Amino acid sequence: MNTPNAGEKFSCPEFLAMERTIIDDFVDCTRDCCAEVEICVKALNAQGGSEYIHRMFRSMHSLKGNCQMVGLGPLNALLHRIEEVFSKIRAHPEQYLPELGEFLLLATDEIEALLSELIRHGQADDMKRKRLSDVCDKLQKDTANGLTSLALTAAIESLGGRALDKSPLQKGVKVELVVPEDTVFMRGMAAHLDKLSIFRKNRSEHTLELVGALNIALGNPADAKQLEAAAWMHDVGMCLIPQSIYNKESALSREEQKILQSHVQFGSQLLMRFGGWEDAAQMVLDHHEFFDGTGYPNGIAGEQIHPGARMLSIVDTFCSITTERSDRGYKKSLMQAVSEINANIHVQFDPEMVTAFNDVVRSLMMKQ
């Protein structure tokens, strides 16, 4: 039974006894849920919208259910209390207050910190857990007749935070017109894309790490700087694809497929307009071409495909398979991803590059 220790620490033996892969998967899911909460809070503060209320509730409910499944009783109880506070506005989204958003962010940060401490040390600070529980209980009582800024501000301060500054712009802060260095700007665009969906968290950084390692393993068939730009920009065109298509869970129509595929043209054309990134632009344009000539947009095959694009194709597929998606509901393991890629040599991927990629992944596994 998972009961808090008398004194200052609590532990969850059932959870800690699980296989490390299960614990790691749980941590990833927790981070994704917390990231989704942050996305929703920012959207609600900026524009409102009942859909963000429902998305946030689903994420918090999913996190609570995951805690229950893996035996994290103390954290599950905390999340139940947080969820009770939040549920006050489910029926009345128009009553959302920015202070509620900040309270939820602070509360989920506390949950993440307790989880991290528990995994590292086998036990976590029970005083912090009790403090958050007590703050939620008091907030429940203080808002029995509805949420108020005053009650939420008190709760925020109890957790060591401050109420949000409601002024739309801070006085004295001037926004300057600055042209950043190309790759800095590209990295910023990729980071913005990754923040648009919980299913892309740190995706661009991971892509760059893997494709860079693969390039080195193959003796640098692509210029490293051009490849970096392609890694940042290969999916940026997705920002211009309608969300109804990008997040569609059922099969796409032929017309919708054409619209989705146009992201490679958008990304390559953006790179061409920077100037000096022609190689990177070609990589972006070619990274969905298949080795047997059945890919898009031009149906080229084999050595006709830019080597940087052939590497990027493997890494992009690997990251896609190992990332949870809205139309799949779960993410496949690293070995399943490698297995799928190996099954598609000569068809989708360059066989020589896949062999090198297997070595890259094996090396990363040994380091971990």
Image (cartoon, rainbow, N blue to C red):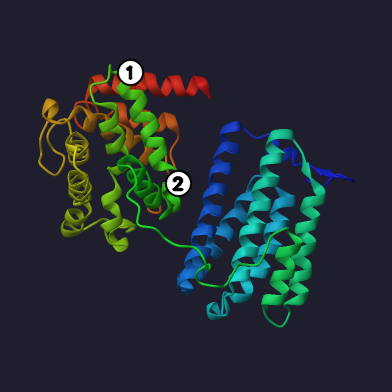
Q: Earlier in the sequence, mark 2 or mark 1?
A: 2
How many numbered marks appear?
2
Q: Amino acid at mark 1?
A: Ala
Helix or strand or loop: what does disc 1 sit on?
A: helix
Q: Quadrant of residue 183?
A: top left
Residues 2 and 356: in front is: 356
**Residue that protrudes farthest toward the bottom in the picture:** 145
Disc 1 crowd rating (10 Å Cα; few below 14, some 14-19, many 20+) is some
Q: Is residue 3 visible?
A: no
Residue bearing the label numbered 2: 201
Residues 111 and 102: in front is: 102
Residues 87 and 151: in front is: 151
Question: 165 left or right of 75?
Answer: left
Image height check: is 131 above or below 100? above
Image location of residue 181, percent across then percent down: 33, 42
Between the residue at mark 2 and the residue at mark 1, the CA separation in whole angstroms equals 26 Å
